[in-house]
Image (cartoon, rainbow, N blue to C red):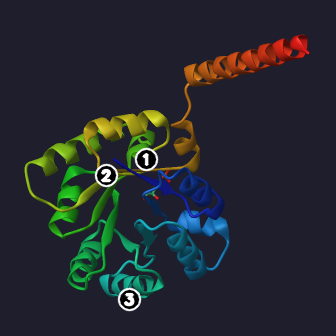
């Protein structure tokens, strides 16, 4: 499974990139607004840091507007993927962009039929929003499972990108469901490393190594 960061924060992206496990980034207008920087300059910096796909979201509602935005985004960096919403206009734009060779991530997906439409339009990624479904009192992960099962019956090229993930259990469940990608906040990626037994085990190993070093040093001193 590929790991994407769901952020536009350069510091977070630099840190995750330094770990060597970052496969891509998803941004959205909320993430970009938080950074308070010029959109193009920010995306270009992200794209230079991360060689994998970097999703950049359109902010128009008509297909023509989305296509115009997408054509501009695509000139910013070769690894830009354009995010369009799962609306009839978004799908119209996705079809045209596919024809132009601009990869698309269909976003704001909350149902299996929406995911099927995205796949039929030839989207590179489809993004089911797990956490927001959970917030609405439904089992968001069931949607990821359903999409993965349904897609397995066909030969769609569309990758299932589990989005709106809020905690490590969402990553575990996405992997078990067979999602191709999990995009997550930086805090969640950091949490994936953690296990209390790792901390305890490491502490003991280091203490034992220190004890041996001290013993050897003491023996050396006793000999002279
Ligand atoms: C995905 O592409 C979205 O940017 C993101 O996952 C939304 O997550 P949220 O529901 O936590 O805002």
Quarter of image, res 38: bottom right
Instruction: In the rendered structure, find residue 68 and report the number of the disc placed on it.
Output: 3
Q: Is residue 183 left or right of residue 13?
A: left
- Residue 152 or 20: which is nearer the viewer? 20
The x, y position of residue 69, in whole percent, is: 42, 84
Element at label 2: loop
The residue shown at (66%, 17%) is 204
Residue contact between numbered discs 1 and 2, judged by CB atoms under 8 Å? yes
Q: Is residue 193 left or right of residue 120?
A: right
Quarter of image, res 216: top right
Neighbourhood count class around disc 3 (C-alpha, 10 Å): few under 14, some 14–19, many 20 upward: some
Q: Which residue is mark 1?
A: 132
Q: Earlier in the sequence, mark 1 or mark 2?
A: 2
The x, y position of residue 57, in whole percent, is: 44, 71
Ligand 1 neighbours mark 1 (CB distance < 8 Å): yes
Q: CA distance from mark 3 to mark 1?
A: 29 Å
Element at label 3: helix
Q: Would residue 139 be visible to someone looking at this image?
A: no
Q: CA distance from mark 1 to mark 2?
A: 9 Å
The residue shown at (37%, 87%) is 71
Q: Is residue 82 left or right of residue 193?
A: left
Q: Would residue 119 be visible to someone looking at this image?
A: yes
The residue shown at (38%, 45%) is 130
136 in relation to 202, above or below: below
Tag in front: 2 or 3? 3
Instruction: In the rendered structure, find residue 110 and report the number of the disc placed on it.
Output: 2
Q: CA distance from mark 2 to mark 3?
A: 26 Å
Q: Quadrant of the C terminus?
A: top right
- Residue 117 or 7: which is nearer the viewer? 7
């Amino acid at each position: 499974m590929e790991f994407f960061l769901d952020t536009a924060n350069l510091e977070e992206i630099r840190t995750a990139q330094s770990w060597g496990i970052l496969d891509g980034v998803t941004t959205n207008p909320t993430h970009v607004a938080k950074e308070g920087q010029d959109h193009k300059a920010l995306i270009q910096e992200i794209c230079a840091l991360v060689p994998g796909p970097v999703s950049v979201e359109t902010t128009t509602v008509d297909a023509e507007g989305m296509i115009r935005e997408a054509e501009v985004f695509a000139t910013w960096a070769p690894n830009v993927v354009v995010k369009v919403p799962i609306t009839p206009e978004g799908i119209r734009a996705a079809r045209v962009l596919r024809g132009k060779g601009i990869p698309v991530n269909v976003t704001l997906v909350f149902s299996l039929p929406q995911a099927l439409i995205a796949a039929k339009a030839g989207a590179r990624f489809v993004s089911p929003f797990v956490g927001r479904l959970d917030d609405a009192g439904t089992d968001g992960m069931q949607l990821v499972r359903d999409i993965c099962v349904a897609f397995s019956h066909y030969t769609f090229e569309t990758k299932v990108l589990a989005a709106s993930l809020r905690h490590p259990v969402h990553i575990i469940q996405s992997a078990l469901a067979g999602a191709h990608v999990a995009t997550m906040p930086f805090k969640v990626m950091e949490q994936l490393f953690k296990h209390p037994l790792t901390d305890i085990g490491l502490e003991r190993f280091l203490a034992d190594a220190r004890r041996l070093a001290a013993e050897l040093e003491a023996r050396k001193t006793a000999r002279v």
